Image (spheres, grey):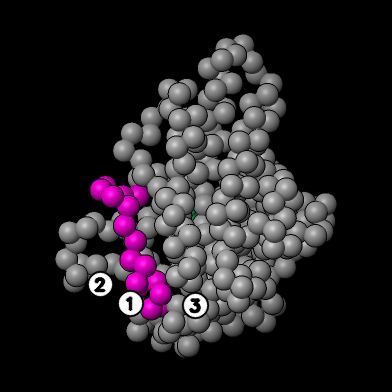
Amino acid sequence: MLVSGAEILNKAHKEGYAVGAFNINNMEMLQAIFEAANSASSPIIVEASEGAIKYAGADMLYAMTKILSEKYPHIPVALHLDHGTTVESCIQAIRAGFTSVMIDASHDSFEENMAKTKRVVEIAHSVGVGVEAELGRLMGIEDNIEVSERDAVLVNVDEAEKFVKATGVDYLAPAIGTSHGAFKFKGEPKLDFQRLQDVKRVTDVPLVLHGASSIPQNVREEFENTGGDLKGSKGVPFEFLTEAIKGGINKVNTDTDLRIAFMSQVRKVANEKQSEFDLRKFFNPAKALVTSEIVKRMEVLGSAGKI
Ligand code: G3H
Ligand code: 13P
Ligand code: ZN
């Protein structure tokens, strides 16, 4: 059933687990997410970036999600706008039927971020849609980073408290050292778990981890064995996800892992069967690997078995 993101995340916040938010651009990814949710009995958040909306259309993404939510009525699902850059972009997603939006004004000043978020909250709440905002910059942190530099990049705990109180935002993404993509850490993976716990204590709302892909070894190998290049890639290890959930994370954004898994299988078929051009022969194994990786993730996040 299509529900508000707040409904899914408030339950996760109360019970201490996290729900995967999986990025989509096409039907196959969406089918894989639903199939995984069905097999793991897990709630899901399906998310689409502005780039995904440009590629597939907000109406199309909504329609496909709605149809699958009716096919699997027992699965709580929210359709979420990922990294909405403007108030207008959030309004358009809400109009298209999205049940959750992120206003990402983290690159603006703190005051500007608050003002935009407040505006989106007013609009979204009037129609029962949940809202996410972000504080700090998504950036890997190094062991030897200066304290002042770390403070400039990562979420500020006092600001987080003020922000949540002033805006009424439903869930918050605090920057604690992750970044998007396949190359998250130069040295050993490192996240600021203490800062995360402090933000949770002062805000007491569901928290969101962006840039949470893990680049699991088997997926990397599938990609590299077909000639793909992921040299130097490093993700967030599963143990870090577990630690982050203990620290208060309830929504775990995952895109890169799914892209690599999907494309590894497309590459494999292309390499092994030079004369194949039936696109279903490429996409079926791609969907199957994405589904099994999502199921594994649902188990790590603790959302498996929650419906
Ligand atoms: O946060 C970024 C997501 O991975 C979406 O990426 O803007 O390439 O669709 P995209
Ligand atoms: P990854 O690049 O780690 O998958 O992060 C995705 C994300 O944060 C989407 O908002
Ligand atoms: Zn993100």
Q: Please say if the residues under marks 1 and 3 sit with CB atoms less than 8 Å apart.
A: no
- Residue 20 among magenta residues: no
Which residue is under mark 2? Answer: 151
Residue 83 x %, y %: 49, 61
Helix, strand, or loop for circle 3?
Answer: helix
Residue 304 x %, y %: 66, 56
Which amino acid, by three-letter code, is at mark 1? Answer: Asn
Inter-mark Cα distance, 3 to 2: 22 Å
The magenta region covers 184-199
Which residue is under mark 3? Answer: 117
- Left or right of 34? Residue 248 is left
Q: Please say if the residues under marks 2 and 1 sit with CB atoms less than 8 Å apart.
A: yes
Give the numbered dot on residue 156: 1
Task: Estimate how packed mark 3 is, as few (under 14), some (14 to 19) or many (20 or more) residues with alpha carbons within 10 Å.
Answer: many
- Left or right of 89? Residue 241 is left
Report whether residue 119 is seen. no
Which amino acid, by three-letter code, is at mark 3? Answer: Thr
Q: Tell me: residue 230, above or below residue 150.
A: above
Helix, strand, or loop for circle 2?
Answer: helix
Inter-mark Cα distance, 2 to 1: 7 Å
| Quadrant holding the C terminus | bottom right
Inter-mark Cα distance, 1 to 3: 17 Å
Q: Earlier in the sequence, mark 3 or mark 2?
A: 3
Task: Estimate how packed mark 2 is, as few (under 14), some (14 to 19) or many (20 or more) residues with alpha carbons within 10 Å.
Answer: few
Which residue is depicted at the point 56% across and 58% down? 301
Q: Which one is in front in this view, the residue at disc 3 or the one at disc 2?
A: 2
* Label 3 C-beta lies within 8 Å of the nearest ligand 3 atom: no
